Amino acid sequence: MTEYFELLGIPRSLHLSLDVLQQRYYELSRQFHPDRFMRSPEAERQKALDLSSTLNDAYRTLKDPLKRAMYVLSQEGFDVGEQRSKDVPPELLEEVFELNMALEEMRGGDDSARPQLETAEKNFTNMLTEVDRQLEVLFEQYDHAQSRDKLTEIRGALNRRKYIQNLVDEVRKSLAPSP
Amino acid sequence: MAYSNKVLDHYNNPRNVGSMDRNDPNVGTGMVGAPECGDVMKLQVKVNPETGVIEDAKFKTFGCGSAIASSSLATEWLRGKTVDEALEIKNTDIVNELSLPPVKIHCSVLAEDAIKAAITDYKNKAVTQTVAVASTK
């Protein structure tokens, strides 16, 4: 599997210029375009097809900062699959559990719980913004000195973000007018 | 993907939902999670220190139907088992019992992890207690 950053010819980093990324993507898309290989031998045509499909995956992955970070983590041997994720810090699990409990209690109530839910929505959204800010800093630090410890921290922050995103979705579902 | 009847049964009538005092020396608590799906699962066992038999098991899971069903089933199986028997419960047993599809196997893994975490917590407490008692002698 061709490495995405390599394929796009950009240095591997968690911060990158979307303009440069897009420009490289367009250039290479043209270069690998099937029309240009109509008269080429089968093997070459297939190769161009494969490259252009990998290129699309690469672009989709790298243009999104979170997917980009997940990609770098997986390339570095971190387990980021759906199947299993150990090493979630206990404090995070406790925190998420408590937040979920509180949310469930509010949802169980009648309309009088609405202001509480609205406050919760605000809090969760603020937490999400806060994690994103942390991630920004961590990304920058990783780009400076590409250390494994930093990646571990990043993975932790991404896990936390995922949980908080879930809570935001859940609380918004409760606030949405019932169908 | 449709849920199996057994999953639906556990989801609609979860067994043993609740919580026990985690400071009780006979209670072991396991808290595990799968961030990718936003799941978090708490499973607790209450062990008779004389016999090593699990007398009560409780759980609370925030997650999908399969995660809830897996932990609900786990608490049913845990009751009456000894601590060592409990450690023999495999996620594949849960998969078979609930007919979980491949994409939901990780939910059963989570339940197995929760059982192991709860038992480990209980055992650690037991050791600490023994040490504490020994040191007062």
Image: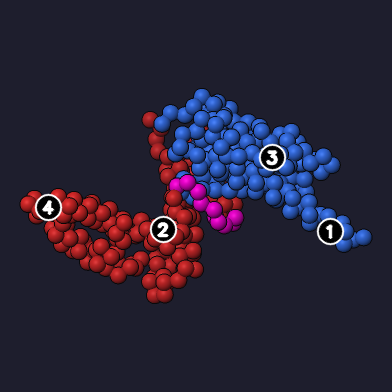
Chain colours: A red, B blue
Residue in the picture at 65% in, 35% down: B75
Q: Position of residue B81 (x, y in %)?
A: 73, 36
What SS does tag 3 mark?
helix
Q: Which residue is mark 1?
A: B132
Answer few, some or many: residues within 10 Å of disc 2's Cα (few below 14, many 20 plus, some between 14 and 19): few
Which amino acid, by three-letter code, is at mark 1?
Ala
| Residue nearest the viewer, comparing B19 with B81 | B81
Spatial CA distance of label 3 from label 4 is 62 Å
- Element class at badge 4: loop
Gap in Å between the C-alphas at discs 4 and 1?
78 Å
Reading the image, the residue beneath label 2 is A74
Structural distance between the alpha carbons of marks 3 and 1: 26 Å
* Residue at left offset 24%, top offset 63%: A8
Classify mark 3: residues with Cα within 10 Å, few (<14), some (14-19) or many (20+).
many
Is residue A41 at all visible to an observer of this figure? yes
Which of discs 2 and 4 lies nearer the camera? The answer is 4
Which three-letter amino acid code belongs to the residue tagged 3?
Ala
Q: Where are the magenta residues, as a range?
A: A82-91
Q: Which residue is mark 3?
A: B86
- Both labels 2 and 3 in a single chain: no
Residue under label 4, please give it.
Answer: A41
The alpha-carbon separation of the residues under discs 1 and 2 comes to 44 Å
Mark 2 and mark 3 in contact? Answer it, CB < 8 Å. no
Give the side of residue A43 with respect to residue A72, left or right: left
Chain to which mark 3 belongs: B
| Same chain assignment for discs 2 and 4 | yes
Task: Using the rendered view, name the quadrant where residue B50 is placed.
Answer: top right
Specify which label sits upstream in the sequence, 2 or 4.
Answer: 4
Name of the residue lying farthest toward the bottom: A144
* Quadrant holding the C terminus of chain A: top left
Q: Residues within 10 Å of mark 1 (few under 14, many from 20)?
A: few
